[in-house]
Amino acid sequence: MPGEKRLTLKQIRAIDAVASARGFAEAANRLATTQPAISRTVASAENLLGVPLFQRGWGGTEPTALGEGVLRHCSNALKLIQAAEDDIEAMHGIRPRLATFLRSHHLDAIAAVITYGGASAASRQLGITQPAVSRAIGAATEYSKQPLFERKRDGLEAKPQARRLKELHDALERELTIIEDLVHRPRSGLIGRLAVGMLPFSGQDLIARAFGELTKSNPDLRLIAVPGSYSMLAEALRRGELDCMVGVLRNPAPYPDLRETYLYEETFTLVARCDHPCHQKNLSIADLRDESWIVAQHGTPIRSYFETLFRSAGAVPPAQTCEIHSFTNAEKVILNSNSIALLCYGEQQLKTLPDGLKKLDVHLPDSRTAVGITYRKAGGPSDVLRCFEKLLRDLIAETSGGPTPT
């Protein structure tokens, strides 16, 4: 019987609303219903398909990897309904209310009556009573705001509006079949989500390379990279919105429920434009206190090192600094200003500085800093996280010429 193993239009609307609203409460407002009702409808869809469609993510509810595919076809289904509304309105100048009120069993009844020639034959094929078929057609007629069938001596004759709704029924069936095939097809590679927080100025290029590798053999893995400050990303990690974060380690992690894992070391480095006057002099840190600076924000290890550097040299840390959260943006500002920046570079990055930038020949004591991954302690890393960490270590070893310690 139709409908036993397929999503209903009600479920399709709920899935689309939750995805676009990024949450169940706002989705309920958009559909003029309650949050528990939306939750039950989505849960029934997940039970029907046998896969989770949503998870808690960065900034709200987000689709799972499989949910992304299901959502795409749910959106297609709603566009098909919209197109049918447009066509029926063009026929008689009356706009139907299909997008809000149409249900799957309404379309089943219309399609069966047209295919089998009458309500009696349709009821036998659908396995429901003839009055149920009549009620479904009556509801669809009300929502269409115009007659769908004309009663003849030998049965019901479909009007053009009804035939357009049968076309809609058949098109929706194709979308629903694709969804069923999608969730039940054999999977290759890793499945799920990897959401990585990217701390400023360190490890971001490594994450980009790792994501590139993961996309090659894991088509069902959803990858998310979120830049931000330590406190913002740590809170998201603790809430489960992120799976890990990569960057300069705090050693130890300031939260007892987080664990840090070492990957490699980077170096605090002073850089400026190649033609900056400071390259022509033999300078110390104290000599640079009046320069214009680009430094990471307060509360970061690199900012703490910056301030300690000047205090150790008997100088007051410069107050006039430009705080930038993006490594790439920081380098662009350096190239277009007279500023000096304290940045964090890996060994390979120092060898390949962008054209126009040059390292300052100024001694920086204890300039090595550890970069690594921060996880939640509870539960330990998932298979996806273990694969990601191994890939990071392989890429580091490839760059440095040797394995990284675990």
Image: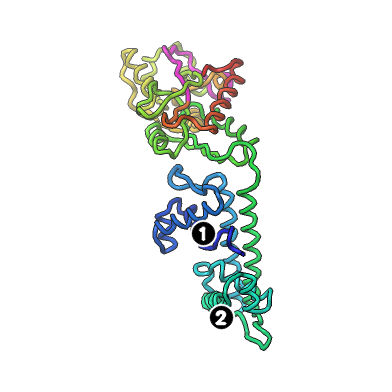
Please tell me whether mark 1 sits on a helix, a strand or a loop: helix
Q: Quadrant of residue 283?
A: top left
Instruction: Count neighbours of disc 1 (C-alpha within 10 A) and say few if under 14, some if 14 to 19, many if 20 or more.
Output: many
Residue at 40% x, 28% y is 258
Please tell me whether mark 2 sits on a helix, a strand or a loop: loop
- Tell me where the magenta segment starts and ends, as one range: 351-372
Q: Is residue 357 magenta?
A: yes
Residue at 62% x, 64% y is 1
- Residue type marked 2: Gln
242 displayed left or right of 121? left
Comparing 206 with 379, the one in front is: 379
For mark 2, what is the residue? 146
Residue 262: x percent and y percent? 47, 21
Residue 265: x percent and y percent? 49, 18
Residue at 45% x, 47% y is 61
Please indicate, yes or no, whether residue 16 appears anywhere in the rendered image.
yes
114 displayed left or right of 105? right
For mark 1, what is the residue? 11
Residue at 60% x, 41% y is 220
- Residue type marked 1: Gln
